[in-house]
Image: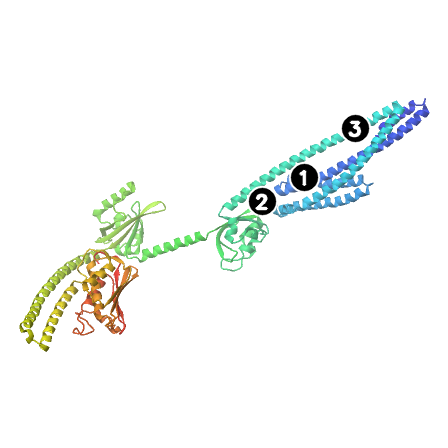
Amino acid sequence: MSEKFILPLRSKIAAGLVTALLVLVVGAMSFWMLFRAAESFEEVTHTSRVLLEQQKLLVGLVDLETAARGYAITGDSSFLGPFYVARTAVPQSIARLRSFTSDHPEQQTRLDTLESVAGDQLRFNDQIIELRNTEGFNRASEMINTKQAKIVMDHARKLTAAMEAEENRILALRAANQKREERLAFLVIGIGGGIAFLLSILINRGIRTDVIERERQGEMIEKQTRQLTKQAETLKTQQAEQERLARQMAALLDSTEAGFYGMDTAGNCTFINRAGARMLGYKRKELIGRQMHQVVHYQYRDGTPYPQEKCPIMLASRSGTTAASEDEVFWRRDGTPVSVEYSTSPIIQDGKHLGAVVAFADITQRLAAQRAIKESEERKAAVLRSTLDSIITMNSDGFVIEFNPAAERTFGYTRDEAIGKRLADLIIPHRFREAHMSGLARYTATGEAHVLGQRLELPALRKDGTEFQSELTITRSDIGGEQTFTGVLRDISQRKTQEVEREQLIKALARSNQELDQFAYVASHDLKAPLRGIANLSQWIEEDLGETLKGDNKDQMELLRGRVHRMEALIDGILQYSRAGRLKGKPEVIDTGALVREAIELMAPPKSIRIDIANDMPQVKAEKVPLQQVFMNLLGNALKHAGVEEPRVEIGWEDAGPFYEFSVKDNGPGIAPQYHDRIFGIFQTLEARDKVEGTGIGLSVVQKIVEAKGGRVWVESELGKGAKFRFLWPKVEITGA
């Protein structure tokens, strides 16, 4: 810019020869003032350059951070161009600033610190890019999240702000000095007239040029700022999209029941979903960064070590190939195995192999189901082999597809001979084949079934042409979507013969029982008639003799009548025993407590005997008379043998599953264990009948009735400790039992 002033100055010097001294003085002063103004302008410009270079340096540092973050987030190599440009520009800006501020020691000191901070920023961003290239997004993200970059940039901004403040201070001083020099210059120019005016024009032109240049630079900076803002918004949008996709992927992985985990080429876990961590018994954060083979795949199912170099998953992760297995074992955190199926897929990014993703699923239940199916098939085969019934299966076309060993024995065909043959041609007599075929066709066409699920008795045909009577049940099942029919057939020829014989025996037994009842009734009537005559005759003789019958004669007459009454009771007992368990009535709901109280009222025991009946005696559905006979016989036995002092009888019950267990207990002399079975025999008593009146039939009647109902009766007793008779009676009596 000094050259712009030199030419006019020379012209003015040439033109001022006339007034040389004046022009020289004015020219010298003008030249001096212009020189001073030019120096001031140069200083202002110099300061502006320093400020601009500071902005470029700060922009370069921001570009470094933005480009490194963009590459770390997206992995897009297009971000590396701006990064490397900024990486070159930052040291150049520092060098220029050092040159521009060489005359300012304080700024040089700040610049030293700023250069160190910029170096830290360069190294930090280099590390981010290196980590992104070598260890992937998560590791680079962790580096970014350390906030180190923010600390460095904040420090850089603080230093540039201090330098900018210092330069602005200097700029203010230099601008003030420039104005002062301009005023002096204007004064000199005013004094100098046209020379000063021309000089001011030239200076203004220079200033205008500088302003235009500064405006142009300002516009460039503003344009770059807009571009950076747009780039930042684009990066922010891309980052938001990446985060959205990452959230979607995480939600997808967490929503599936299958396990997924990622590995780098060294086998270290980079991610794992919730289902996978749960299957392995870990929390997800416990697996991130760990060597997965050493954690979950370190040994075979039998517990022997599993070398890494033989592990298909590790080989696939290192080589970029795939691997899969349908029956493998992983190991949970607690050391228990889990059966899994797995498959791997390589992770490729920008053509570079980064590791593998492993998808796996727990197949424990599936294996158990397969084992159950296999066991079921084995059991089915065992049943088919071992059952005594013939089992034959045919398809919807009537062809045999199953023929068990029992069928081979029954019909005379081997399994190989029967399989694939038409069932009607094998075992159905000729006269029934047309009906069989038409029935099968009708069911196949309409679904109308007349024989499915029914128990049928039909003639069957053997290989040798003989027929036999069979019992047949047919069921339908679908195998592989095809209708099949399974018949279970049994040869009942012998059973039918036995049924005929049984019917004949039942009829003969019924006739025999009827004749026995008639005989017992006639015998009872014919035996009781003379006994009543003897009793009446002894009574008449005693009445006729009156007081003349004394002493032993009278006792003997009373003994005679007692024996007659005992004989009548014996006859009644025999009749009762012969009918016990054979006479049938209609079952009804019986309150056993009321039944016992009714029996006691009928027997009218002495008031001195204490009788205790258990609370809440149960209800049973049974014939009333047989149960009443049982209680009356047992109560009668207990009342006869109750203790002499404070006689007592107790009636109780307990739940015994399908039975009620009733008990009748007395506090009499008891029964020795060796007689516990004997007392249930007919006509058996343990004391002389003259001492304790009885026929010896009551307990045998009880046993016969109870056993006829499917129960049993027994006694618990020891000498001197009373006796407790127990019997089981069904809760619900089956008609006909």
Q: Residue at x 11, y 75 (%)?
A: 555
Q: Is residue 585 above or below residue 716?
A: above
Specify the farthest residue to the left.
544
Q: Residue furthest front?
A: 547
Q: Is residue 99 left or right of residue 552?
A: right
Contact, mark 2 vs mark 1 (Cβ under 8 Å): no
How many dots with numbers?
3
The label shown at residue 348 is 2
Height in image: 190 above or below 176?
above
Q: Is residue 11 visible?
A: no
474 or 102: nearer the eye? Answer: 102
Residue 114, x across and y down, in percent? 75, 44
Rendering coords of residue 425 (x, y %): 25, 48
| Viewer-nearest residue: 217 or 693 | 693
Distance from the alpha carbon under mark 2 to that under mark 1: 23 Å
Residue position for label 1: 81
> Residue type at mark 1?
Gly
The residue at the far bottom in this view is: 552
Residue 439: percent from left, percent from top: 25, 44
Dot 3: within a 10 Å radius of its alpha carbon, few (fewer than 14), some, or many (20 or more) residues? few
Kind of residue at badge 2: Ile
